[in-house]
Amino acid sequence: MQGKRRILIVGGGTAGWLTAAYLARYLDLAQQAAFEITVLESPELGIIGVGEGAFPTLRATLAFIGIEERDFVRATSATFKQGIRFDDWLHAPLPDGTRHHFLHPFEAPLDAEGPGLVPYWLLQPEATRPAFAAAMTIQNRVVEQGRAPKRAEEDAFGGPLPYAYHFDATRLAVLLQARAIELGVGHLEGRLIGVEPDGKGGIAHVLTREHGALEADLYVDCSGFDAALIGRALGSPFRSARDVLFTDRALACKIAADAPEGPVQPVTIAAAHGAGWTWDIGLQATRGIGCVYSSAHMSDEAAAAVLRAHIGHDRYTARLIPFEPGFRPAQWAGNCVAVGLSAGFLEPLEATGVLLIETAVAMIAELFPFAGPMDLAAHRFNARMTARYERIVDFLKLHYCLSRREEPFWRDNADPASIPASLAGLLDAWRHRPPSRFDFVIDHESFAYFNYQYILYGMDFVTDLSPARGAFPNDAVAMRRFAQIRRFGEQAVADLPGHRELIGQLRG
Ligand SMILES: Cc1cc2nc3c(=O)[nH]c(=O)nc-3n(C[C@H](O)[C@H](O)[C@H](O)COP(=O)(O)OP(=O)(O)OC[C@H]3O[C@@H](n4cnc5c(N)ncnc54)[C@H](O)[C@@H]3O)c2cc1C
């Protein structure tokens, strides 16, 4: 049809179908004929099918595209994620069996802004004060007691505490596909075999084995690590982050849950090992487990042994997934924009993969010009996404560089030469004051100042406020507030259902 804007999405993983559903909803595809969105995917190549932890933003995204929370929970075997518990990151397990752990919950610390409570926590004696997240949040207690973040009768996607989900990645792509098709997205099964450049840095048309040439106004590269359009065809350079983040391999597997109706962890468990970490994610009937490591510091055999030791038996099949940490600074080139793994991948420690897809898609929807050239949209998109990736690199590095573990991987991570200047400068400042919202530019960040506080103080980082003790005279008020937070936590534990109970209720 004359004047129609055509969008062709290459790839049918989470990135492809989420992009399709979001744009279809945003552009109200079902109601008007000005746009056409098609997804081309190759079932023969399949999808990566890993990535089981989300960010709280996924709730708003699902609500926006019109997927019901109960349907999502049923269809993707989802459970409720309230944050990440980090085991053994500060030091390796001690000979007497003592292990270090801390929680990075989704809930912001109570009274975190301005002078607030943080200085009063910092000024307490280190040996006797409660852990940072325990002192500052309700969620810490709720997680420790295995409670859910909400009651079944609460509004869909709402509730008293922030939460995200753990889910089966393959089933999520299937659910998103069904919704996108309902919203009017076209679906072609076939393999992309060539790309004809337009001579202006973009794409004239793509060639497929089954459907011949396909032409569009905007091409969205969701082809995963293959980066068939943005990388292979257009040659947009990849910027490696390997000099900062050393992990480059994952061994991933799925095992049956210990007891089908037993307790499910309401957090991701990220346990450090000699050259990386393992993830452990509880779904409804299975556990997704993986070992992330640096191939420069650990062999594949040693990583397999770490995974086996974590699981406690060898009755599973693990998949080896190599990756290069990094991203493309020019993710939008001419009339082609990359979303998902084709744009970049850092590592799954803070589960930023789907978050970056959500960010990119929202940005494409809002910046997409209804007519005329795309240069300004591309320029803005590239600047914002580059900043996002750079800032995530810093945040991930924070977890590693504060460790006091002795193994070479951890010593290399603490080497100042491997710490970006932007992070080193903030760490210097934070020795004398806690992270503040003014340290960050909101549109460049995936994490707020309080996320940094959780990692810093979880890892025993010292912000020395003792020279300014006199500036914080309201000790008694602060102590009352800490006691109140404790009571709120206890009340929440009493009011909220167990995690497994909520899942059962939502599954109906
Ligand atoms: C080890 C690991 C752990 C992760 N953990 C998390 C996590 O906890 N949380 C999180 O948010 N993210 C995580 N991620 C990232 C997450 O997996 C991805 O962001 C997400 O799955 C999106 O993938 P994708 O759609 O970009 O790629 P894919 O799922 O690989 O999809 C690519 C699609 O392109 C198609 N395709 C490729 N080439 C062609 C061609 N020539 N012709 C036609 N079709 C083609 C494929 O068939 C497929 O449909 C993790 C990633 C890894 C590697």
Image (cartoon, grey):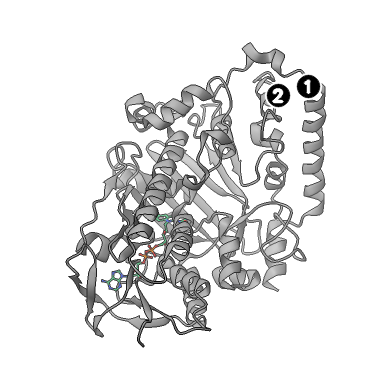
Percent of width and height locating residue 397: 42, 36
Percent of width and height locating residue 465: 62, 17
Q: Which element is circle 2 on?
A: helix
Left or right: 126 in relation to 3: right
Q: Which of 414 and 219 is in front in this view?
A: 219
Image quarter where ligand 1 lies: bottom left
Q: In this view, does 189 lie above or below 73?
A: below
Q: Which residue lies furthest to the bottom in this view?
A: 1
Please rate how many residues cluster around mark 2, counting C-alpha atoms within 10 Å: few if below 14, some from 14 to 19, many from 20: many
Percent of width and height locating residue 375: 32, 60
Q: Do the residues labelled 1 and 2 touch (CB within 8 Å)?
A: yes
Please identify the quadrant where the N terminus is shown: bottom left
Q: Mark 2 points at which residue?
A: 120
Left or right: 51 in relation to 258: left
Disc 1/disc 2 C-alpha distance (Å): 8 Å
Residue 411's disc is none
Q: Mark 1 points at which residue?
A: 474
